[in-house]
Image: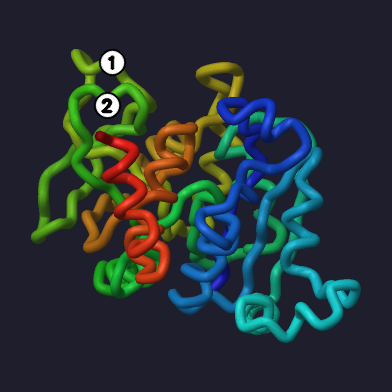
Amino acid sequence: MKVVIPAAGQGTRFLPATKSMPKEMLPVIDRPVIQYVVEEAIASGADDITIITGRGKRALEDHFDHNPELGKFNDLPSMRSLEELADRATIHFVRQRTPRGLADAVACSARHVGREAFGILLGDTINLCRPPLLRQLWNRYEELGSRSSVIAVEPVPDAKVSDYGIVAGPEVRPGVFEVQRMVEKPPLSKAPSRLGITGAYVLTPAIFDAIRSTPPGRNQEVQLTDALDRLRQREKVYAVTFQGTRYDIGDRFLWLRTNLEFAMRDPELRDRLRPYLKELLK
């Protein structure tokens, strides 16, 4: 399976921390976010991964490269697992020269992906799912005949509707909706449903033609939701719910909350953190 991971965003919500460091390299406990994403891709069956980067993103390449200067530290279990991870799939890096939106970033992978279906995971989102979210989507893709794009969705609260691409359509089987409308970040009053696109996809190669014919939208960026709306006029697109939890680290609060929740899952950190939090909250 080929997987594309767009990681070219500028991370402006984390400035000045992201002035010289990619937001995808922000740590969640002891690993950068991008490592969690690559781990999910490989656990889902990916053997070929393309990470779309931009200016100032060389740290992403360095993270998955061998570093002999670390010497004895390469024997640490955490470092061995990173080396093993990088060996389990071929990882390519392609630069998006100008920040023109998510769809444009995906289009940068067109020559490499070729004429086969492929997965997409966002470089700033961690999914904790069993089976892995992308594997759940691929299974749905195959169940639906291996010729229709499949996108992950989840219900979003009213206050968050304007932050998401929203889809609507009839439920054709439990948890599977045939998409008939897609709107990028609509105001609540114009949202066709409360099903928000979460940032995980299995797309047919027809998406590239759809992207090329999609004009720029908000902020002069080519939106993937707009391209998918064009695609669903040519072939069926399905939205599917999933089992598991999604962690978006798109702003300071979400990143901090993710760190706290992950820390509470670690036995050592939980035992040390719980009494501290109780004292802090007195």
* Residue of label 2: 161
**Residue 88 versus residue 160 in the image, above or below:** below
- Residue 193 rendering spot, x and y as whole percentages: 17, 31
Q: Viewer-proximal residue, 265 or 219?
A: 265
- In this image, 83 relative to 185: left or right? right
Q: Quadrant of the C terminus?
A: top left
Residue in the picture at 44% in, 74% down: 44
Asked if the residue at tag 1 contacts the one at tag 2, i.e. Cβ–Cβ closer than 8 Å, the answer is yes
User: What kind of element bears circle 2?
Assistant: helix
* Residue of label 1: 187
What crowding class fits label 2: few (fewer than 14 Cα within 10 Å), some (14-19), or many (20 or more)? many
- Residue 11 rendering spot, x and y as whole percentages: 62, 33
Q: Viewer-proximal residue, 94 or 260?
A: 260
Residue in the picture at 38% in, 43% down: 257
Question: Which one is earlier in the sequence, the residue at label 2 or at label 1?
Answer: 2
Residue in the picture at 9% in, 60% down: 174
- Residue 179 rendering spot, x and y as whole percentages: 25, 43
**Residue 209 versus residue 167 in the image, above or below:** below
- In this image, 281 relative to 222: left or right? left
What crowding class fits label 1: few (fewer than 14 Cα within 10 Å), some (14-19), or many (20 or more)? some
Residue at mark 2 to residue at mark 1: CA–CA distance: 7 Å
Residue in the picture at 52% in, 20% down: 217
- In this image, 253 relative to 140: left or right? right
Amino acid of disc 2: Val
Amino acid of disc 1: Pro
Q: Residue furthest right?
A: 69
**Residue 165 versus residue 3 in the image, above or below:** above
One can see residue 147 in this view? no
**Residue 213 badge:** none
